Image (tube, rainbow, N blue to C red):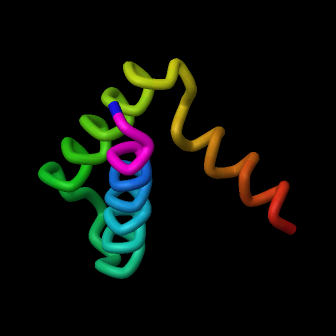
Amino acid sequence: MKKSELKKLVSDYQDLKLKISRRNLPYDHALSEKLDEIKHRYFHETGNDIEYDLKSSARRAA
């Protein structure tokens, strides 16, 4: 997987997380499935957890 594809996965993940937080719904099955799929693909390609990588990169940027 190319770097641009990984960046797209991260971007999609962040967009979905934002949608979930803005909707104020208790649970949305379709969005949670998409998030799980993105997490799985990211882990398969990098061997790292996407949430951990985003948190650690945010710490480095601060």
Query: From the viewer's perspective, is residue 32 above or below residue 16?
Result: above
Query: Residue 23 vs residue 30: left or right?
Result: right
| Residue 22 placement (x, y as % from top left) | 37, 81
User: Foreground residue, 48 or 18?
Assistant: 48
Query: Residue 21 vs residue 55: left or right?
Result: left
User: Foreground residue, 1 or 59?
Assistant: 1
User: Foreground residue, 8 or 51?
Assistant: 8
| Residue 8 placement (x, y as % from top left) | 34, 55
Rendered-image quadrant of the C terminus:
bottom right
Rendered residue at 25%/35% (across/down): 37
Q: Is 4 a magenta residue?
A: yes
Q: Is 31 a magenta residue?
A: no
Rendered residue at 64%/39% (across/down): 52
Query: Residue 54 vs residue 26: left or right?
Result: right
User: Foreground residue, 24 or 30?
Assistant: 30
Q: Main secondary structure of the magenta part?
A: helix
Query: From the viewer's perspective, is residue 16 above or below residue 24?
Result: above
Query: From the viewer's perspective, is residue 58 above or below residue 5?
Result: below
Residues rendered magenta in the picture: 2-6
Query: Residue 59 vs residue 29: left or right?
Result: right
Q: Residue furthest left?
A: 30
Q: Determine the image quadrant of residue 11.
A: bottom left
* Circle count: 0
Rendered residue at 33%/31% (across/down): 1
| Residue 25 placement (x, y as % from top left) | 28, 70
| Residue 34 placement (x, y as % from top left) | 21, 46
